[in-house]
Image (tube, rainbow, N blue to C red):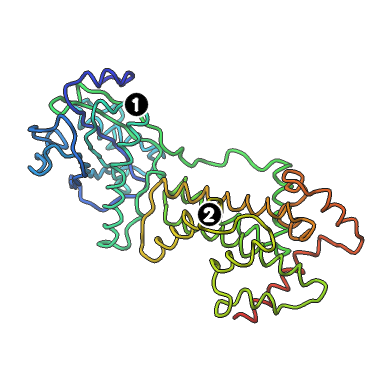
Amino acid sequence: MNQMDDPDEAQAAVGPLILTFLVALPFPCPLPHGAVISKLLPGTVEGLEGIEARATQDGPALPSTAQGRPFVSLKFWQLKERQSGTSMNLQALAQVCAEITGKPLPEQDFADGTVDAYRTVVEMVTVHSADRLHPQETALREAFVRCFDVLTDVSSMAKLVMPHSHPVAASEQTAVALWLARTVAGSYADGWMGVMALTPPSGPLGSVLDETEMTRLNAHLHRFWDGSPFELAMERSTEANRAFRREGDYRNAVVQAAMFAEIVLTSTLALMLWEEQLDTPSIDKAVAVFDFSRGGGLATRVKTEYAPRLGGVWDSTSPGPVHDWSHAVAALRNRVVHRGYRPTYQETETALAAADELLEFVKARLAHRVTRYPRTALLTLGEPGLRRLGGWSRANAYLQDPAQVPDLWFREFAAWREAVDACLS
């Protein structure tokens, strides 16, 4: 078969195309070999009217209600695999591809070696209008996502039947997919095929931290050990991106992004309250602010506590970073936690971006109010951040006071915050 280099070649075909993707899952899925699950999608596809649609050439026709409708159909292959199989799973993919196209197997004997387990390959089939194949890469990814959404449904529901089975499949956990395209009445032998790169597979350690990176690591460690809350916040941000980009766990990514944003907001307010009480040491004001029974939760604090101290727009109904955090992060997190909602790729990407923008907004406001909150600004932004956002000259003037010992600030803050938390518990 030929690589579909020119989408016009496909558009010249009569009627819509059947697209097939082959993916070898990183974890086996417990559906039996040969099992087929299909889902009809809303809408219609021009050119399918009156045609008996079959997801696979040798499979049964889809029900009459499917005529003219877009669909996704999954067929599960359980292949015996040696433990020495490559992380790209190309052997398993090539075997299925050879079987459904009629091409001979590669010379390598796949049956040799000790069989340790099954490798699940899913044949995902959907229909796609030929006039929507440009640009080709975008069209293929759109169809792939459509298929994988159904596979995720099947995988997650299978865990209800077999709770101790492997994690739910996610496209970010797969390294590569094979795709095939044919006309509704044609065969794979006369169609097109190619390889679609997905997420690069994790490999062995290729490098170690250099001298500059080691300096950064030591700085983070000492800040963390001294009681900095921001290392914990950035840890949640890193976890959110890993869950999103590497694991495809959109729920976890949204929850982690929400935790990141809440730690940033809560820690910034706590630092400002700590700095406000330096002349007359007390925890009473902070206890009143953070007491849910008296001051309300985070949303209430955002409405009342930040604008008087930092300025800027903190109204969640007005356009800006706080509005985006409230709607794209906090509200989405509530849907995930309270309703079990599964966010989409786009919703998750938007949530992570909104959480990052909130952090930048907080930093910018602290730089603007560095004269009022020099310690909070220095502990949050440091010299590089204050030079970037402005305010370093004012912060540096504060540091010239010999009574100021920045190395002790996080430890002093952490002890004060522990006292506040003790009163709240």
Q: Which residue is mark 2?
A: 318
Crowding near the residue tagged with mark 2, few <14, some 14–19, many ≥20 C-alpha atoms within 10 Å:
few
Q: Position of residue 180 (x, y in %)?
A: 26, 29
Residue plotted at (29% across, 45% down): 120
The image quarter containing residue 372 is: bottom right
The correct choice, above or below, for 153 with respect to 418 in the image is above
Tell me the distance, in whole angstroms, between the alpha carbons under discs 1 and 2.
Answer: 39 Å
Residue plotted at (19% across, 22% down): 189
Q: Amino acid at mark 2?
A: Ser
Tag 1 near tag 2, CB within 8 Å: no
Residue plotted at (71% across, 77% down): 283
Q: Residue furthest front?
A: 318
Q: Amino acid at mark 1?
A: Gln
Q: Position of residue 194 (x, y in %)?
A: 32, 26
Residue plotted at (9% across, 32% down): 51
Crowding near the residue tagged with mark 1, few <14, some 14–19, many ≥20 C-alpha atoms within 10 Å:
some
Q: Position of residue 182 (x, y in %)?
A: 21, 26
Q: Considering only order in the chain, which callout, 2 or 1, is on the residue closer to the N terminus? A: 1
The image quarter containing residue 282 is: bottom right
Tell me the SS state at disc 1: helix
The correct choice, above or below, for 68 with respect to 29 in the image is above
* Image quarter in which the C terminus is found: bottom right
Quick one: 108 or 201, which is closer to the camera? 201
* Image quarter in which the N terminus is found: top left
Residue 16 falls left or right of residue 397: left
Tell me the SS state at disc 2: loop
The correct choice, above or below, for 377 with respect to 389 in the image is below
Q: Which residue is mark 1?
A: 136
Q: Position of residue 371 (x, y in %)?
A: 80, 57
Residue 414 falls left or right of residue 68: right
